[in-house]
Amino acid sequence: MKICLALSSGGHLSQAYNLKSWWERHDRFWVTFNKEDAVSVLKGEKTYCAFYPTNRNAVNFIRNFVIAIKILTKERPDIIFSTGAGVAVPFFYVGKLLGCKTIYLEVYDRFDSPTLTGRLVYPVTDKFLVQWDEMKAFYPKAENWGQVL
């Protein structure tokens, strides 16, 4: 199985990295920002750089949509996984068009309101995971995976 982990650096990367026992068993590649924390954490991992900032930045959204097409048609992953944020959106939609399965894990620090990214990818996510039962009020088809951090 081949996994694309498409996520922002910082806390989003930390939460995904905590799932190492899952993703390390599979062929994988990462799509994140070219920032110091991501470069150091992902040293030795196959990594592609996305454009940032992504929050409400239409130009970078379009740029990331274009790289999603290029990367996903080249790599052909079976699964696209993300913990957010904005970089996940173009990868989930392009991936869905290419027949990829998508898994989204809503971030740990959200227990009383959904994230913008979560709301945007929810319609195309095959498995939507939350870390708090309270989040199922916003995402009815979600599964509670418990705390990842």
Image: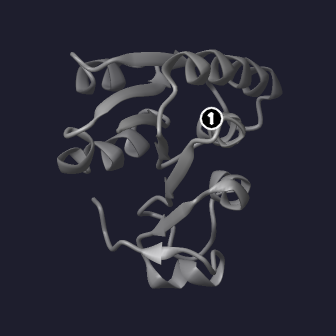
Question: In the rendered image, which residue does mark 1 sit on?
Answer: 91
Instruction: Report the label total.
Output: 1
Q: Secondary structure at mark 1?
A: helix
Q: Tell me what residue is drawn at x 38 percent, y 26 percent.
A: 29
Work out whether residue 9 or residue 48 is closer to the camera in this orientation and state it.
Answer: 48
Q: Quadrant of the C terminus?
A: bottom left
Residue 98 point in image, percent of width and height: 66, 35
Q: Tell me what residue is drawn at x 21 percent, y 16 percent.
A: 44
- The three-letter amino acid code for the residue at tag 1 is Phe
123, above or below 141, in the image: above
Residue 3 point in image, percent of width and height: 40, 37
Work out whether residue 146 or residue 54 is closer to the camera in this orientation and state it.
Answer: 146
129, above or below 46, in the image: below
Q: Is residue 34 visible?
A: no
Q: Tell me what residue is drawn at x 77 percent, y 29 percent.
A: 57
- Scheme by which the image is coloured: one colour
Residue 17 lies in quadrant = top left
Q: Is residue 37 visible?
A: yes
Q: Tell me what residue is drawn at x 47 percent, y 43 percent.
A: 79
Q: Quadrant of the N terminus?
A: top left
Q: Residues within 10 Å of mark 1 (few under 14, many from 20)?
A: many
Residue 13 point in image, percent of width and height: 37, 39
Q: Is residue 85 left or right of residue 96?
A: left
94, above or below 14, in the image: above
Residue 123 lies in quadrant = bottom right
Q: Is residue 30 left or right of residue 138?
A: left
Residue 35 point in image, percent of width and height: 41, 19
User: From this viewpoint, which residue is outermost toward the right?
Assistant: 58
Q: Is residue 142 left or right of residue 5?
A: right
